[in-house]
């Protein structure tokens, strides 16, 4: 996993609540058995005017000029600003894969759906929860200021606005550590392999019916 | 200290706890399907890791499989590749059970687990699918997980989790005629919103829940994720135990007695404290219909489509306006005047035998309206299908002009050929009415099986309690 330490990135505002993972990456792209290459189909139904199917050359498809991420000023954005309950719906990890492949490294919003939130951390994508007043203010600034950027410092747990205002955010210490170091969960968990084996052995005795062969 | 059921389930699975409270939870059952597993199997192989405990894995192909012309196999090459990849992975790695495409016991992953007794009380159950919450009906801690976590569970038999807060949703009083578990779920989501359960583990209790069959409880727990909760569950009672007796992977003989003795402890203790409680009067719940593009956009059958100006919050107002535009609905239209083009009866929410019986009871002796283009009935599994046929339900559906299909996810998410065309309106027993969920541009209204059948007959949403 790619480590996340600091980021100074262009902000793209997606002013909608309840953006679901079907919208982030529609199901027809879930047929891929790969992990990469979902970026061109992120937000596919909103982003293009034609119907998206796997295997198309997205560079040749007609873009929807009304979709905010298609505006020239937001090209190259690394931070997605969003509203309540972003990432609700299906557990598909293709959603963070698509966002990451698109070029996003961090998401800022008031709340994130639980499974999606979790999936982000496994993919080097940092979801940041801020109070609604701060998110409102960021939307205003982002819309009013072409080239609006934010600085994110994970170690310090801060988002810094161009006017110098610092917005602190919370992050789980364990997740923070993993993200800062780019650690892979499996390797970390396997440090406890002995514990797991012991636990399992006890369980086989206490609840043997769980171990049908 | 009295404990909640959640506390008990949690404590029974903690292998290790980090200082910040992140726990390593032991996973008893890992359900696997073709869509969210290929990258996990590949990751495992690349890292040179082996699955920790193969006997925890139960797998099936469901999302991509066609529901008709099984003799032709899977014609879409991309879908076929995904299903064949699962075949190959299971062949290589192994599993407690695998129900591949066309197997007599194949079906939707959340239907086959319980009906085979592969979901047992007190288990942790995971699957790379958000509706894994379904298995909570058996007093399981059942989580939907992402693909990285699928790989993590395969490699370590554990999942990293933080303990949730607890919410008791208490539904009392007998349900009215024509009101089912689906209506409870939708009414709850209408009340607390799709983020209302975020961060909580929901226990469903109260006399209306106790009165539900296991099928009904599964429907309810299935929808817990649509209320934002990762897990939803119901305590063990005699209904749970009766359901499990004699299932293929249920314990037998002396082990059965030991298991039952343990399962009976899987209830919240008297006086246990919950972080939040929501009380719902079961008697007041009416048949529900969603009108928008989120399950919380719901009203009862006697209600009407709202207007954006009914909502004070500007983000909500904007969301409602966008939903109405997408759904092609005019504010203040009574729900009963909304016509449907298609009807879908199926999905892991409502494709079990009881759901099909409820739909068939409405369809019996009636015919679908001519204006309704298609009514799909898709059983949740091969076993459900055979049971329904043994009861003659297939004949009832066919006589009513409905199509009787092979099992699978089908038009719940339209990864196979079953889908809505742009602008088509569907009464669906599935769980998500998001934009494009059942086909690009398709318009989904979530309802119970009985209400779906009633819509098929009337050609519009109709109160199942008043059918002529
Ligand atoms: S029936 Fe629908 S919700 Fe259930 S597992 Fe299949 S696609 Fe997911």
Image (cartoon, rainbow, N blue to C red):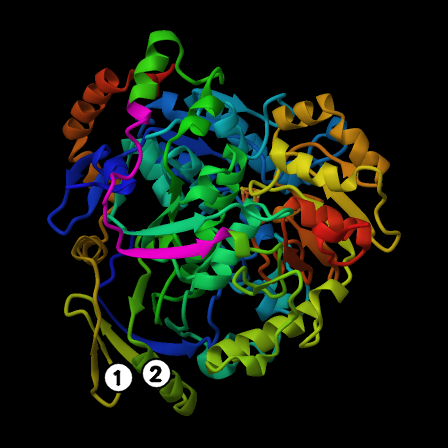
Instruction: Answer with left or right where residue B152 lies relative to residue B435.
Output: left
Q: Are marks 1 and 2 in contact (CB under 8 Å)?
A: yes
Name the spot of residue A97 as percent of width and height, x first: 42, 55
Does dot 1 land on a helix, a strand or a loop? loop
- Name the mark on residue A161: 1
Whether A167 is among the magenta residues is no
Placement of the C terminus of chain A among the 4 image quadrants: top left
- Chain ID at mark 2: A
Neighbor class of circle 2 (other Cα within 10 Å; few <14, some 14-19, many 20+) is many
Height in image: B36 above or below B419?
above
Q: Quadrant of ligand 1?
A: top right
Name the spot of residue A203 as percent of width and height, x first: 23, 22
Residue A68 in view, yes or no: no
Q: Is mark 2 within 8 Å of ligand 1?
A: no
- Name the mark on residue A25: none
Q: In the rendered image, which quarter is residue B120 located in?
A: top left
Instruction: Answer with left or right where residue B150 lies relative to residue B24.
Output: right
Name the spot of residue B83 as percent of width and height, x first: 58, 33
Looking at the rendering, the stretch of residues picked out in magenta corresponds to: B262-282
Neighbor class of circle 1 (other Cα within 10 Å; few <14, some 14-19, many 20+) is some
Does dot 2 land on a helix, a strand or a loop? helix
Q: Residue furthest right?
A: B370
Instruction: Answer with left or right where residue B413 lies relative to residue B204.
Output: right
For marks 1 and 2, the one nearer the N-term is 2
Whether B268 is among the magenta residues is yes
Height in image: A100 above or below B86?
below
Count of numbered tags: 2
- Name the mark on residue A138: 2
């Amino acid at each position: 996993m790619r480590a996340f330490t600091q980021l100074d990135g262009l902000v793209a505002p997606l002013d909608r609540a309840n953006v679901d993972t079907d919208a982030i990456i529609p199901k027809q792209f879930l047929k891929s058995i790969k992990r990469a290459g979902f970026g061109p189909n992120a937000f596919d139904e909103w982003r293009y005017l034609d119907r998206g199917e796997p295997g198309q050359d997205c560079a040749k498809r007609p873009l929807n000029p009304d979709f905010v991420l298609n505006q020239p000023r937001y090209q190259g954005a690394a931070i997605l600003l969003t509203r309540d309950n972003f990432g609700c719906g299906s557990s598909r990890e293709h959603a963070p894969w698509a966002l990451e492949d698109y070029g996003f490294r961090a998401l800022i919003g008031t709340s994130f759906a639980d499974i999606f939130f979790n999936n982000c951390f496994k993919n080097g994508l940092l979801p940041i929860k801020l109070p609604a007043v701060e998110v409102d203010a960021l939307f205003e600034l982002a819309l009013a200021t072409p080239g609006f950027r934010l600085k994110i410092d994970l170690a310090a747990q801060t988002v810094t606005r161009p006017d110098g205002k610092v917005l602190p955010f919370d992050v789980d210490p364990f997740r923070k550590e993993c993200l800062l170091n780019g650690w892979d969960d499996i390797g970390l968990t396997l440090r406890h392999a002995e514990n797991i084996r012991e636990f399992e052995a006890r369980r086989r005795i206490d609840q043997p019916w769980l171990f049908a062969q | 200290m009295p404990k909640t059921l959640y506390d008990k389930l949690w404590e029974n699975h903690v292998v290790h706890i980090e200082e910040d409270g992140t726990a390593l939870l032991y996973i008893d059952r890992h359900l696997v399907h073709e869509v969210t597993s290929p990258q996990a199997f590949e990751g495992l192989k690349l890292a040179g890791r082996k699955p920790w405990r193969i006997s925890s894995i139960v797998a099936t192909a469901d999302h991509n499989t066609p529901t008709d012309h099984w003799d032709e196999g899977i014609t879409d090459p991309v879908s076929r590749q995904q299903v064949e990849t699962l075949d190959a992975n299971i062949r290589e790695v192994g599993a407690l059970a695998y129900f591949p495409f066309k197997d007599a016991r194949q079906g939707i992953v959340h239907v086959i687990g319980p009906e085979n007794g592969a979901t047992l009380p007190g288990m942790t159950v995971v699957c790379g699918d958000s509706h894994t919450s379904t298995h909570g009906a058996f007093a399981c801690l059942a989580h939907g997980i992402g693909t990285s976590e699928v790989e993590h569970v395969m490699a370590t038999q554990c999942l990293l989790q933080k303990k949730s807060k607890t919410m008791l949703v208490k539904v009392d009083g007998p349900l009215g005629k024509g009101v089912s578990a689906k209506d409870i779920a939708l009414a709850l989501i209408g009340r607390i919103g799709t983020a209302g359960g975020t961060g909580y583990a929901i226990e469903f209790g109260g006399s209306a829940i106790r009165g539900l069959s296991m099928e009904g409880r599964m429907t309810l727990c299935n929808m817990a994720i649509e209320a934002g909760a990762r897990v939803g569950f119901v305590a063990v009672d005699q209904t749970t135990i009766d359901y499990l007796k004699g299932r293929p992977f249920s314990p037998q003989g002396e082990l059965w007695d030991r298991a039952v003795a343990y399962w009976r402890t899987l209830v919240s203790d008297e006086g246990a404290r919950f972080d939040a409680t929501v009380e719902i009067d079961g008697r007041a719940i009416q048949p529900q219909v969603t009108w928008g593009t989120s399950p919380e956009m719901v009203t009862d059958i006697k209600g009407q489509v709202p207007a954006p100006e009914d909502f004070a919050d500007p983000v909500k107002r904007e969301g409602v306006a966008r939903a109405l535009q997408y759904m092609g609905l005019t504010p203040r239209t009574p729900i009963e005047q909304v016509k449907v083009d298609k009807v879908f009866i199926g999905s892991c929410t409502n494709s079990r035998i009881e759901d099909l019986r409820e739909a068939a009871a409405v369809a019996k002796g009636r015919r679908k309206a001519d204006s309704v283009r298609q009514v799909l009935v898709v059983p949740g599994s091969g076993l459900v299908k055979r049971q329904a046929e043994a009861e003659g339900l297939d004949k009832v559906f066919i006589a009513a002009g409905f199509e009787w299909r092979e099992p699978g996810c089908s038009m719940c998410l339209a990864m196979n050929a079953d889908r809505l065309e742009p602008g088509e309106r569907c009464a669906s027993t599935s769980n998500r009415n998001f934009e494009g969920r059942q086909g690009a541009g398709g318009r989904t209204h979530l309802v119970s099986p009985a209400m779906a059948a009633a819509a098929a007959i009337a050609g519009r949403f109709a109160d199942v309690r008043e059918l002529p």
